[in-house]
Image: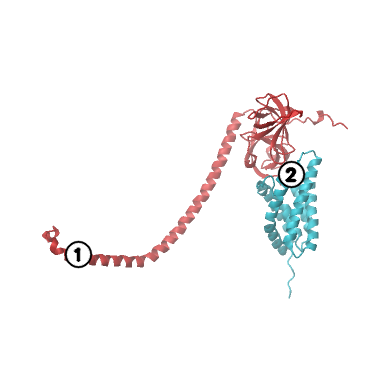
Amino acid sequence: MRNLVAIPVILLTVILQSAVISRVYLLSGIADLPMVMLAAWALQEDVDSAWHWAAATGLFVGFISGISWIVPFFGYMAIVFLARIFQKRVWQAPLLAMFSITFVGTIIVSLLSIVTLGFVGVPLPISDVLGLLTLPSVLLNMLIAIPVYAVMRDLARWVYPSPEVE
Amino acid sequence: MALALGGYFSSASNVFTGSLVNLQTWFSARFVAVQDFLTSPRDIASLRQRNIELEGEVAELQAQVIQLQQQVGKTQILAALVDFEQANPENRYLAAAVIGRDPSPFLHYVIINRGSNDGILRGMPVVTNQGLIGRIDAVIADAARIQLITDPASSVNVRLQNAETEASLVGSVTGDVTLQLIPQDINVQAGDLVLTSGLGGGYPPDLIIGQVVNVRSRDFDLFQQATVQPVVDFNRLEIVLVIVNFKPVDISPVEPAPAP
């Protein structure tokens, strides 16, 4: 039943992204709160619903955004996939895993956006995209990674309480 | 007594009165000190209480000032929009507030709080009192998405007022807008005004877009290019006007098919 918290959390995250985060620029880059939230959620040990969260968030972002739904949907799925791998490999250093996923995830979503927009004929100079958009976005995502990770860790403990030892 | 008060016994009374005055001064000073000691703690407590009350009032007033400043800002924007509407009576406008931006940094879209319930349709142009900002790209019941002219996929047919020529204005991923397809034989100068031409039926004619900032003309190019400074500050969009009586023309059936 507590899994239903996904609905308000995803709604709130995407609304915050559109109303607030998207207005805070560094050069032309902005942070991607839904992506960081999903990475933090998928890195939690007991969480088994990360795929559902990624699908729902991807579709909702695709609905709001002008970009094709393919980009957020498959981008977020790839991030959950990576997070699951990292969570098993570097489980002793969750913050290192969080930073790594944030970095790689931003690059993946950027690449997917470039490819998708290229298919529909939108001209994107790669040097501009990398220097003015992708790298600043990476930095902003790194900045919000730690607080988002802390919030999602507390949320995961509430949704999946560990059995008490007697 | 009268003689003493008149100062006739001054030499005789100096010693006596001087001692009295000194004694009274000593008593007075001690009394004031004791009074201060007895009354000051009560005063500090009441002052602290009063200070807390005043600080509360100051905070309340500061909040009111901020609210009023926001209202003044909004009123100024609305007044400017009303002026614009009165100056352009040929169009019917619907005001809408900008409530968000596109979550993707690659695109330049904004979201407004009016939708199909308010009569908004896809393709309607959107302006502010300063000039054109874009057109409606998608609509739901109570909201709509606007594709800004700075979007990399946006293309607007424009004319240069001073040069009497037409060109195409395209956006970019960084938000800069560029004029393309300017014939080489046209003399374009910085400061030339850029307006919509109305060609293609996507936008009504004569909406202001911006001014030419610089021109790039090379002999081996087929066309000149120019950078345009838009008149609208796209980072500070708050309230916009949708032109609701403009029906965009769909020219896709008459567009030539791409060569195989």
Chain identity for the colour red used in the image:
B
Residue lying farthest to the front in this orientation: B219
The image quarter containing residue B249 is top right
Q: Residues within 10 Å of mark 1 (few under 14, many from 20)?
A: few
Q: Amino acid at mark 2?
A: Val
Q: Position of residue B142 (x, y in %)?
A: 69, 43
Report how far apart the C-alphas of labels 2 and 1 lie in the structure.
Answer: 93 Å
From where the camera sits, is residue A11 visible? no
What mark, if any, has residue B18 been given in the picture? Answer: 1
From where the camera sits, is residue B159 visible? yes
Q: Residues within 10 Å of mark 2 (few under 14, many from 20)?
A: many
- What is the chain letter for disc 2? A
Look at the picture and state if B82 lies above or below A65: above
- What is the chain letter for disc 1? B
Compared across the picture, whether B124 is left or right of B58 comes to: right
What mark, if any, has residue A129 been given in the picture? Answer: 2
Q: Position of residue A118 (x, y in %)?
A: 80, 41
Look at the picture and state if B175 lies above or below A154: above
The image quarter containing residue B77 is top right
Q: Position of residue B250 (x, y in %)?
A: 77, 31
Choose between B244 and B62: the one closer to the eye: B62
Q: Secondary structure at mark 1?
A: helix
Look at the image and tell me in which quarter the C terminus of chain B lies: top right
Image hue for chain A = cyan
